[in-house]
Image: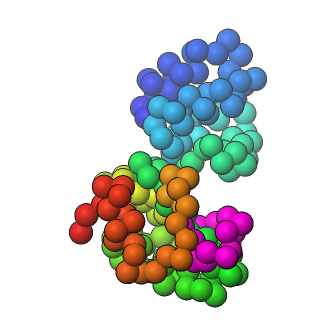
Amino acid sequence: MDEKRLDEIISRYDYPSGRILGILRDIQVSEGYIEKDLLRLLAEKIEVPVSRLYGLVTFYSFFSLQPVGRHIITLCMGTPCHVKGARTILATLEDLLGIKGEEESGKYFATTADNQFTVVIARCFGACSMSPVIQIDGNLYGYVTPEKIPEILAGYGWHP
Ligand code: FES
């Protein structure tokens, strides 16, 4: 997002520093994510500490600091799923989608170059009896094996 567009969003609000969530929401909706540099620029313009903006963006799951793909694949990494091979499922997803995310403090985030898929990890969907489990755009898939993944992804427009 360029500065002009950011100014346009800020100008929608009479009292911008009191409407931070509204501004952040508008940026998120417009761009699909909120760039860190843009967060700094916004902080300067509305005269609030960037740490406050950062805190809000990381607190609310609606916001993302990185581009999010059209389809969100959430892989369960809870203990039962982990024991039943969630790591292999993640490696298969990375291989098929050509992504390599970094896992940090139990978080993982990677988006394909064409912005079609974002892979994240979660801890337990409450469907441990079907482990390992993945969720795509809210649809749950249990007893997932590496062999089943291409067919599942094909349902979302993926092809080799
Ligand atoms: S640990 Fe994966 S669904 Fe519970």
In the rendered structure, the answer to whether residue 45 lies left or right of residue 139 reads right
State which quadrant residue 39 falls in.
top right
Which residue is at the front of the view, 114 or 152? 152
Where's residue 158, x and y in %? 30, 60
Numbered range of the magenta stretch: 121-134
Up/down of 68 relative to 110, above or below? above
Q: Is residue 128 visible?
A: yes
Which residue is at the front of the view, 73 or 21? 73
Up/down of 158 relative to 92, above or below? above
Where's residue 145, x and y in %? 46, 80
In the rendered structure, the answer to whether residue 22 lies left or right of residue 34 reads right
Where's residue 64, x and y in %? 57, 48
Where's residue 142, x and y in %? 55, 71
Residue beneath the point at 37% across and 80% down: 147
Residue beneath the point at 51% across and 43% down: 33
Q: Residue furthest top?
A: 14
Magenta run includes residue 132: yes
In the rendered structure, the answer to whether residue 60 lies left or right of residue 93 reads right
Residue beneath the point at 47% across and 50% down: 68
